[in-house]
Amino acid sequence: VVSAYRGLLEARPVGQTINVSSGVTHSLREVIDMCRDITGQDIDVQVNPAFVRANEVKTLCGNNARLRALVHDWETPPLRETLSWMLPSA
């Protein structure tokens, strides 16, 4: 993220809105499975129906085309790599 912001400071996209995102979608199930694989810990997930909105967005993905056009060498690490950095191995 820092390299994206640095590149944007250098590109100076005045007045533009830029999404800083990977452009890749992951389901919550995929993220939970990655966390389980990385830590070796089982994760018990329970959903409280009272907190589930009827109009919940099912899929959300940031469009990073404008960012990539402005910051040519910007790359985002794969989510698994970021999670491995964030989560201590068991």
Image (cartoon, rainbow, N blue to C red):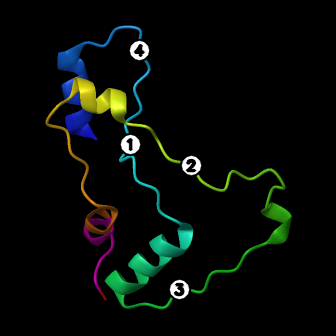
Report the mark closest to the observer, 3 or 4.
4
Foreground: 16 or 51? 16
Name the residue located 74 percent from the left edge and 53 percent from the top edge: 56
Name the residue located 23 percent from the left edge and 19 percent from the top edge: 9
* N-terminal label among 2 and 3: 3
Counting other residues with Cα less than 10 Å from the Cα at mark 3, is it few (<14), some (14-19), or many (20 or more)? Answer: few
**Mark 2 falls on what kind of element?**
loop
Real-space Cα separation, disc 3 to disc 4, in angstroms? 41 Å
Task: Identify the residue position indicated by label 1 in the image.
Answer: 21
Real-space Cα separation, disc 4 to disc 2, in angstroms? 21 Å
Real-space Cα separation, disc 1 to disc 3, in angstroms? 26 Å
Q: What amino acid is labelled 3 in the image?
A: Ile
Task: Identify the residue position indicated by label 4 in the image.
Answer: 16
Counting other residues with Cα less than 10 Å from the Cα at mark 1, is it few (<14), some (14-19), or many (20 or more)? Answer: some
* N-terminal label among 1 and 3: 1
User: In the rendered picture of this protein, how many numbered marks are placed on residues?
Assistant: 4
Task: Identify the residue position indicated by label 3 in the image.
Answer: 43
**Mark 3 falls on what kind of element?**
loop
Q: Position of residue 19 (x, y in %)?
A: 41, 32
Q: What amino acid is labelled 2 in the image?
A: Leu
Task: Identify the residue position indicated by label 2 in the image.
Answer: 60
